[in-house]
Amino acid sequence: MSFSDEDEVLKVGSEEEEEDVEKKEISGQEDQLESCPLTQDMVAKSLSLLCRTGNGLSHAYVRLDLKSKGLTDLALISSFIHLRYFDISSNHLSDFSPLAGLTQLLWVKGDGNLLQSFEGQPFGQLAYLQWLSFAKNRLFDVKGIGGPALETLNLTGNGIQTMQGLEYHNLTNLVTLELRGNCLETTDGIYLPNLRHLYLAQNNLKRLEGLEKLEHLNTLHLRDNKIETLDGLSPDMKCLQYLNVRGNLLSSMRALRNLANVRQTLKALVLFENPLAKNDDYRMYVISHLSKLERLDKDPITAEEKSASQEKEFEDEDEEDN
């Protein structure tokens, strides 16, 4: 084994040890929590929205708001089989298996809990679940997530480091994916055939990969990352209309050259707070290369700007970089 190989092994081992320590700390915090199981009285005070049941012969309350109740146990919820809308955010829950029998659920908000993994959880079994949010939990990956009818998934503010384990055949109807404020370094692994909106701001992204698989993507939000080039943009992205790369490390016009791959559809582009934005010509340069663009940063593109950009001559990109 070479010194470089040995260093890599030590690095990987150190990262695994750090992750194990963090998970143990979380487990220790859970052990210290005072037990607070769900009670009938809590449910009775929090139910609303009377609707017909599935058979149309009776009525039941279908909305339940249990936000900020200090709950550590949801076992009792399994008997409320008619629930459709369930807010369980800001509690101390790590096990959501009691939801398995709530087959009518359409909407679940579990923000601010202690969920560490989707593996072993019931969400993929809920045939009608369309909207799911587990922002600000303790998730490190996306293994086990699924849902045949799921259209919106919000995982903002977790510690997710990789998209490995994201099974596209379990999320065929997903339209919106929120992954802001995680620890992702690459976009690779996000293969979702019907995805329209992808939010990846405030991660550690350094490169764009695998985006050619997102043929239906309309919105790509990449603000506040560490991206130096847009080379990952693909001509297969035939529906992209909005791209936000504000607050990255794009330093030259050459870093924008792959915008040409989406010039037929792109209508709005945000480039604020990149080094290249200090160049006086950058706005004219972008407008001259993207004929369908309607808005750059906060400002609409005027007919006068379009005309002026066609008349202006720009230095060769390679010479400029040199």
Image (cartoon, rainbow, N blue to C red):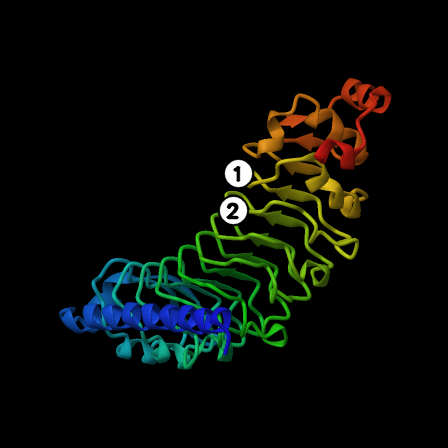
Residue at which label 2 appears: 225
Image-based side of 211 in relation to 63, left or right: right
Q: Which residue is mark 1?
A: 247
Residue nearer the viewer, 32 or 195: 32
Q: Are marks 1 and 2 in contact (CB under 8 Å)?
A: yes
Mark 1 and mark 2 lie on one chain; the one further toward the N terminus is: 2
Q: Quadrant of residue 61?
A: bottom left
Q: Position of residue 245 (x, y in %)?
A: 59, 42
Q: Which of 1 and 183 lies nearest the eye of the viewer?
A: 1
Count of labels shown? 2
Residue 262 x/y as whole percent: 77, 46
In the displayed structure, 224 sits above or below 276; it is below
Q: Is any part of residue 255 visible from this angle?
A: yes
Q: How many C-alpha atoms fall within 10 Å of the one at disc 2: few (<14), some, or many (≥20)? A: many
Find residue 263 and report its horizontal and vertical position in percent. 79, 42
> Is residue 19 positioned above or below 302 on the image?
below
